[in-house]
Image (cartoon, rainbow, N blue to C red):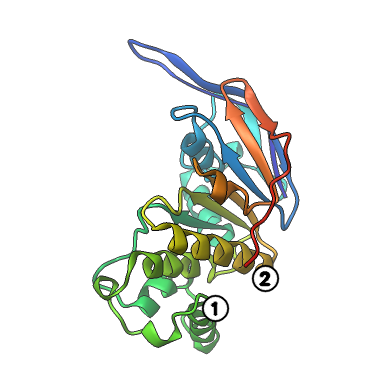
């Protein structure tokens, strides 16, 4: 489903530096991996490259056989809208829209606004446990509730690939635990492939595998994660 081969990224300038090189990754549909690594090693950069927001110096990224390097900016935008979902640490919930309106955004961008879309929106909001808050504005929600809405928005259009960047950094431990298990369960329900970037070992243990990014590539953590019970 996702194939990354010999990916490399560096930055020029007065102090040129290599972010990483020789990154290889193969993920099948439904795989869920966590990527860890030291600060500054390029974890978020890797996510941006997989999303087509940043270009590699060399190597390739293929999503369902499509080489991202062969797509122009417009084609990459359409691919992100249809095939990818994003969950961020900062939530990025629009403050002047209700919960339902925020969740509807990916479907609206795809031109899906009919009864089926409305049913899908309601089902996703219910799936994250906030059916009674559909008409609420973001200022009326807690941090954990905002992240739940971000998950619903990321998955409402049934993306094939979900990219998750430090989703619990703004949450208390109990909210973080609930959000992480909710995210995993919602992705599994739709068979989505997921990549979680995190500094948190507790967060990483909710994935199927833990990978460690260094300047010389990705390696698998030797100890298999033990999932916490829900």
**What residue is disc 1 on?**
127
Determine if residue 109 is in view: no
Number of the label disc, if any, that sits on residue 110: none
Element type at mark 2: helix
Whether tag 1 and tag 2 are in contact, CB under 8 A, the answer is yes
Q: Residues within 10 Å of mark 2 (few under 14, many from 20)?
A: few
Element type at mark 1: helix
Q: Nearer the viewer, residue 126 or 53?
A: 126
The image shows residue 167 at horizontal and vertical percentages of: 45, 53
> In the rendered view, does 98 fall on the left or right side of 199?
left
Determine if residue 226 is in view: yes
Question: Residue 160, relative to residue 45: is it above or below?
Answer: below
Q: Residue at x 43, y 73 (%)?
A: 103
The image shows residue 204 at horizontal and vertical percentages of: 59, 47
Q: Nearer the viewer, residue 151 or 9?
A: 151
> In the rendered view, does 228 fall on the left or right side of 86?
right
In three-dimensional space, the C-alpha distance between marks 1 and 2, rounded to whole angstroms, equals 10 Å
Q: Residues within 10 Å of mark 1 (few under 14, many from 20)?
A: some
> In the rendered view, does 193 fall on the left or right side of 183?
right
Q: Residue furthest top?
A: 14
Which of pointers 1 and 2 lies earlier in the amino acid sequence?
1
Number of the label disc, if any, that sits on residue 189: 2
The image shows residue 230 at horizontal and vertical percentages of: 62, 67
Question: Residue 106, relative to residue 22: is it above or below?
Answer: below
Q: Residue at x 69, y 35 (%)?
A: 221
Q: Residue at x 44, y 64 (%)?
A: 175
Q: How many marks?
A: 2
The image shows residue 156 at horizontal and vertical percentages of: 53, 71
């Amino acid at each position: 489903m996702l194939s990354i081969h010999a990916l490399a990224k560096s930055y020029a300038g007065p102090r040129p530096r290599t972010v990483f090189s020789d990154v290889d990754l193969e993920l099948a549909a439904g795989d869920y991996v966590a990527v860890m690594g030291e600060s500054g090693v390029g974890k978020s950069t890797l996510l941006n490259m997989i999303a087509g927001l940043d270009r590699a110096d060399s190597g390739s990224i293929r999503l369902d056989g499509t080489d991202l390097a062969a797509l122009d900016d417009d084609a990459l935008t359409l691919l992100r809208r249809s095939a990818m979902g994003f969950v961020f640490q900062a939530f990025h919930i629009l403050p002047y829209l209700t919960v339902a309106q925020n969740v509807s955004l990916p479907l609206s961008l795809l031109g899906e606004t009919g009864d089926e879309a409305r049913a899908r929106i309601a089902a996703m909001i219910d799936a994250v446990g906030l059916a009674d808050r559909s008409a609420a504005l973001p200022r009326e929600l807690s941090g954990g509730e905002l992240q739940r809405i971000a998950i619903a928005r990321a998955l409402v259009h049934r993306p094939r690939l979900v990219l998750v960047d430090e989703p619990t950094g703004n949450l208390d431990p109990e909210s973080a635990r609930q959000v992480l298990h909710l995210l995993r369960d919602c992705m599994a329900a739709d068979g989505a492939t997921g990549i979680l970037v995190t500094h948190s070992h507790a967060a990483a243990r909710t994935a199927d595998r833990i990978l460690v990014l260094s300047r010389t590539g990705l390696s698998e953590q030797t100890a298999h994660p033990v999932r916490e019970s829900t």
